[in-house]
Amino acid sequence: MRIKNGKIQIKNYNFQYWTLNAIIFVLAIITIYSFTTLGLNVEKHNPIFDSHYFRIGQMIESFLKFDLDLKKYFSKMIVSLISTFGLAFLSTVLGLIFGVILALMSARNLSNKYISDLIRGMNTAVRAIPTFLIVLLCISIYGMSGTSAVIGMTFHSTAFFVKVLGETFEEVDEGALEGIKSLGGSWIDLVYAVVLPSSITKIVAWSAFRLEINFGVAVIMGPFAAVQNSIGSDLKRAVSTYNFTEIFLTITVIFMTMYGLQYLAEQLKKRAKID
């Protein structure tokens, strides 16, 4: 706040102010131009479309019909749920293993400055690349399979753990580290005697949080990487056949699973006192 010509000037019209407004203006123009050139329309592909307008009532009615063999559906859904959860769990575990090792090497209180800066720089580059691009690269090597999905998800899980666990390890009490060093302890002694025991609760909490994220990604990776017997693939098939009953049930299963994982992650984070 400044006083100019005897008046109170609340806004500070500096270079940062004009730059921010210019960026917002350019993004608004791009958004409007994109919507005018996309040619969005709704075609009459099935009975729920009438005169190019979507009938919400008919869609809800189709959702609630439940004209589906529930026994057969749920027996298949359990297999798909286990398969999708397996993708998320495997990528989380692999990411945690690699992430802990690299996080120990990136923590400035445990590693050489140059090694730490190198790992941090590479980790930032990996986190800047979307998971789908990494999976797409893996598809060109391993083909459309669960292997490509796991490798791509593991890359981002590793980058996540390097970031959060590296900062966690740097918060370890320096006095305890110096005490081990004064007794002639090696780097491995520091890790096993001080770093890991004092960080184990946060490691578990962050792992649960990452598992929640990876499950959501695994659902999308099902149709993207053509993973057989996954929830995402089942949902894509239901959408392509306009089976709204199956769509509704599948979305419900995904929501309940995500809610359960989120609740678990939140409880573990609270116990670990992570903000």
Image (spheres, grey):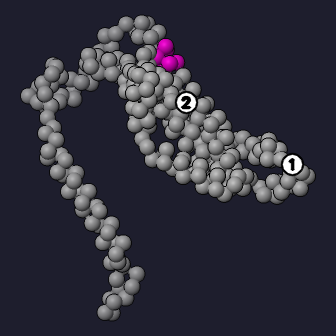
Mark 2 secondary-structure assignment: helix
Q: Toward the viewer: 173 or 270?
A: 173
Q: Residue furthest right?
A: 183
Q: Is residue 231 above or below residue 3?
A: above
Q: Secondary structure at mark 1?
A: loop
Q: CA distance from mark 2 to mark 1?
A: 34 Å
Crowd around label 1: few <14 · some 14–19 · many ≥20 (10 Å) = some
Q: Which of the numbered marks, if any, corresponds to residue 185?
A: 1
Q: Residue at x 19, y 47 (%)?
A: 34
Residue under label 2, please give it: 91
Q: Quadrant of residue 260?
A: top right
- The secondary structure that most of the magenta stretch takes on is helix
The mark lying in front, picked from 2 and 1, is 1
* Neighbours of disc 2 within 10 Å: few (<14), some (14-19), many (20+): many
Residue 196 - label = none
Of the image marks 2 and 1, the number of the one nearer the N terminus = 2
Q: Residue at x 16, y 41 (%)?
A: 38
Q: Which residues are magenta?
A: 78-83
